[in-house]
Amino acid sequence: MRWMTTPLMGAVLAAIVLSGCATGYTLDHAVQTYSHLSSVPAQPAYRFERLPSQQSSDPIQTAIESMADPALYKAGLRRDDSAPRYTVQVSAREQRVLSPFADPWDYGGWGFGWGVGYSHRGLGIGLGGPLYPRMEQQWFHREVSVIVRDLGNQQVVYETRATNDGPWGDSRTVLPVMFEAAMQGFPNPPAGPRRVDIRVGS
């Protein structure tokens, strides 16, 4: 016996999400970091560096850097484009995916067609079936990364990334928190994959 049908489960989830927006919610992140730094450097100045695919005038990349900057500052780094010791590359990816709470048998569209043909075998009628699953319950997979490179020897001294899956649709709120999770523990984070939870809102 199924104690809770999927539509009812979806309704409960929606209620949780809406209540979470009003009272705050917790973002859980899967984080992995590699560090060659033993302490915060004496001159922790940095400038952002962009890959060839990240054009200098790209407004999206500019927005991502703005979202990452508070997390870098909180970690102890200071932006100084005129006299940097490090370069920092940041990236963010977002993809809307099918919610894990969605019913795989619940379809959002049906194709219906019929045809009648006559032959020595008699009449034939054809009907269509479901076309695609519902995606009413929004769900997002996001990933952010930070790479810190020493300008003196061009070596990567810090690399970290954080991933999150959930229904939260406001990237302007979620991505800065993800960068904070990715930088947590700088410059000596715990070894290996870890989970970092950060509360958003009150």
Image (spheres, rainbow, N blue to C red):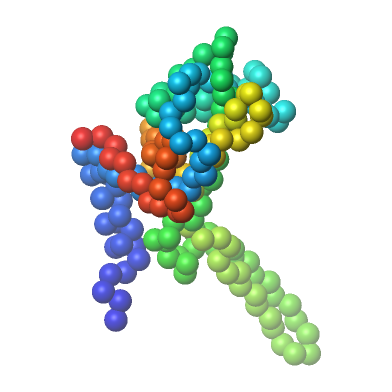
Foreground of the two, 111 or 31: 31
Residue that appears at 28% across and 40% down: 199
Residue sitting nearer the eye, 69 or 148? 148
Above or below, comparing residue 180 to residue 1 in the picture: above
Instruction: Report whether residue 176 is seen.
Output: no
Instruction: Examine the rendered structure and indicate whether residue 68 appears above or below residue 134.
Output: above
In the picture, measured across the screen, residue 169 lies left or right of residue 51, that is left
| Residue 90 rendering spot, x and y as whole percentages | 55, 32
In front here: 143 or 148?
A: 148
Q: Is residue 135 left or right of residue 177?
A: right
Q: Position of residue 178 (x, y in %)?
A: 42, 38
Report x, y in % for residue 177: 38, 35
Quarter of the image that includes the N terminus: bottom left
Is residue 200 visible in this depiction of the protein? yes
The residue that appears at 25% across and 34% down in the rendered structure is 201
**Residue, x 51% and y 61% (percent of image)?**
133
Q: What residue appears at the point 30 percent right and 76 percent down from the top-left corner?
A: 2
Specify the quadrant of the image occupied by residue 23. top left
Q: Quadrant of the C terminus?
A: top left
Task: Find residue 20 and report its image quarter.
Answer: top left
Question: What x and y, as percent, mark residue 78?
Answer: 45, 19
- The front one of 173 and 145 is 145
